[in-house]
Image: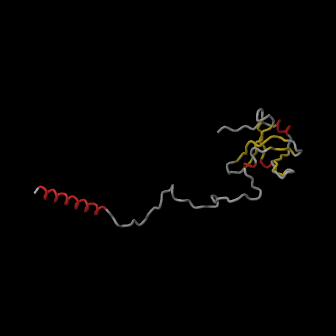
């Protein structure tokens, strides 16, 4: 008799649990669904975010400028490009040239407008950076100081 009661109680529990689960399950599909979260949804590509596939005529990579020697029109080596100044809109506005010193020791940083820098080819066909000032003029120019903040 105990086995019969125990079996009936087990079957009732299983049947009641299945009925409860069926009552809470819904087969209705929501009318609006969200696919992904904001972090996984791909944003639309706009003109401002379209990838650039290649350089255009007149474009220069910073790797072709920073670290390069800078020469005066006379051919005298003035120094080398230490850095570029970029404004808030992303436009390169200046070039920081290290002048004087030896192996970077005693070198003075001088900034010139980027437009003062011209790119030509030397007799070997390699890119050469030139400015229309002398080494002496740049050594007498104010030292470029980075603003705090």
Q: Residue at x 45, y 61 (%)?
A: 34
Q: Residue at x 34, y 66 (%)?
A: 27
Camera-nearest residue between 110 and 9: 9
Q: Is the N terminus in the top left, top right, bottom left or bottom right quadrant?
A: bottom left
Query: Seen in the image, is 16 located left or right of residue 63?
Result: left
Image spot of residue 62 (x, y percent): 72, 49
| Location of residue 79 (image quadrant) | top right
**Above or below, 132 relative to 29:** above
Nearer to me, 149 or 107: 107
Q: Position of residue 81 (x, y in %)?
A: 77, 43
Quarter occupied by residue 29? bottom left
- Say if 120 sits above or below 136 in the image: below
Residue at 72% from the left image edge and 45% from the top image edge: 85
Q: Position of residue 130 (x, y in %)?
A: 83, 47
The reply, left or right, for residue 14 in relation to residue 52 is left
- Asked if residue 84 is positioned above or below residue 23 in the image, the reply reads above
Q: Which quadrant is the C terminus positioned in?
A: top right
């Amino acid at each position: 008799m105990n086995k019969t009661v125990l079996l009936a109680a087990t079957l009732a529990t299983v049947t009641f649990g299945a009925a409860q689960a069926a009552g809470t399950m819904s087969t209705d599909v929501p009318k609006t669904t969200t696919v992904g979260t904001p972090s996984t949804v791909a944003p639309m590509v706009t003109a401002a975010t379209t990838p650039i596939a290649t350089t255009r005529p007149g474009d220069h990579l910073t790797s072709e400028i920073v670290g390069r020697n800078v020469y005066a029109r006379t051919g005298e080596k003035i120094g080398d490009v230490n850095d570029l100044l970029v404004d808030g809109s992303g436009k390169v506005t200046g070039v920081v040239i290290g002048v004087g010193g030896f192996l970077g020791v005693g070198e003075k940083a001088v900034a010139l407008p980027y437009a003062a820098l011209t790119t030509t080819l030397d007799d070997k066909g390699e890119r050469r950076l030139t400015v229309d000032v002398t080494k002496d003029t740049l050594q007498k120019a104010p030292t470029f100081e980075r603003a705090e903040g």
